[in-house]
Amino acid sequence: MKVNFCDLQKQYNLLKTKIDSGINKVLEHGIFIDGPEIKQLEETLAGYLGVKEAITVSSGTDALYLSLLALEIKPEDFVITTPFTFIATAQVIALLRATPIFVDIEADTFNISPEKIEEFLKSPKDPISKKRISLDKIKAIIPVDLFGQCADYDQINSIAKKFNLTVIEDGAQSLGAQYKNKKALNLGDIGCTSFYPAKPLGCFGDGGAIFTNDKPLADKLRCLKNHGQEAKYSHKLLGINGRLDTIQAAILLAKWDAFINQEIALRDQIASCYIKGLQELEDKGYIVLPKIKPGNKSVWAQFSLRILNNLRDEFKDYLHSQGVPSAIHYPLPLHQQKSLAYLQYKAQDFPIAEEISKEIISLPLHPYLEKDEISYVINKIKEFFRLNVK
Ligand SMILES: *Cc1c(COP(=O)(O)O)cnc(C)c1O
């Protein structure tokens, strides 16, 4: 059997009529930039999240970048984030010449640890100069809702309030998730998501969105994503071209009902099947299954488990040889990436992120994975441990 990690073809075949007609409408009206589908999508997203303002943008990365631009983050500023995420989260801070400050994660959820944020803020040091940072230079926290599970916003928001920090939720993986009956992406001051094809809700190219309840901030973001333009060829701010294409908005609108009414629940059912099927391997001490905190509802952007006893790479090779693809999110924490080496962090600075990055692996998970495919993956995993553990 050959299983797909993520099956966009199958989804397209199921939703073909709706998607094709959505795209065709755009081809017919010809308003490829800022067409009516953009406003329609923004209203749909804002209505679902219960947030006042939704601003579509060109990618999840640009959503984060524009948020920092809107906050006027300067080179002497510091922004706190997690070392265990996709590079974009920290890259945008560094691109503005501000300094990313990493804080280690929780071992069970893989999300940034609020306790460790507080600990850092008790005696904040610049990773490069090792000098004490004055608190007014620490401007924001970017928690990431990793693999579709929200970070601990009650704790994070209360720390942010105490230290006057803006919370930018990196919800690139969490559209459709919930935290204590509140929707992901409406949990901090600003929420940023991505419509990259493989995310829970993906378009057919790059795309993203920013959410906030702050109207003046939303107006600024709309201006910044359009070259800082207030009227045609009159530019009051330094901005970028960060707009979403109308065609991508039409595709997202065509996928919306299936995402909200079916796919979120299907992802959760598949994750439950994996957990049920693999529980005995956790009980034997071979693996650690993903842990969802009480009050959280993950959207399962990834089903990522830990393979213990240094077997992760062999495990991956074995699954591959049996037609089961997998992926490693992420093999190297950000403080160990070459592009961020100038920050002078060293090995063992964030021991949990470092350990998890050696053990983590993501299994195939998409809403259209069939029962027999799930069973096949589970059986192949069990077979691996039968063959490799005495
Ligand atoms: C995918 C992702 C991004 C970037 O989104 P793009 O749309 O690919 O630019 C940022 N942060 C996280 C956590 C992501 O998973």
Image (spheres, rainbow, N blue to C red):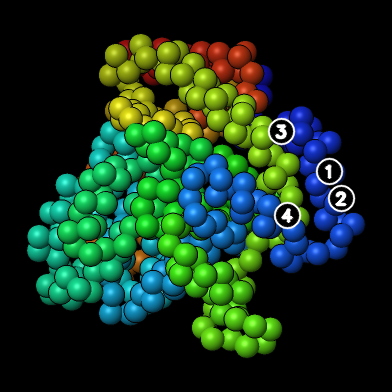
Residue type (three-letter) at the residue carrying disc 3: Gln
Q: Secondary structure at mark 3?
A: helix
* Mark whose residue sits in front, 4 or 1: 4
Left or right: where 388 falls relative to 123: right
Q: Nearer the viewer, mark 3 or mark 2?
A: 2
Q: Identify the mark nearer the N-term, 3 or 2.
A: 3
Q: Is residue 218 above or below residue 75?
A: above
Q: Which residue is mark 2?
A: 24
Quadrant of residue 67 within the rendered picture: bottom left
From the image, tell me which residue sits under label 4: 37
Tell which residue pokes out farthest to the right in this image: 28
Quadrant in which the C terminus appears: top left
First in sequence, mark 3 or 4: give its number.
3
Residue 151 left/right relative to 46 = left
| Label 1: element kind | helix
Q: Are marks 2 and 1 in contact (CB under 8 Å)?
A: yes
Which residue appears at 64% of the width and 18% of the height?
370
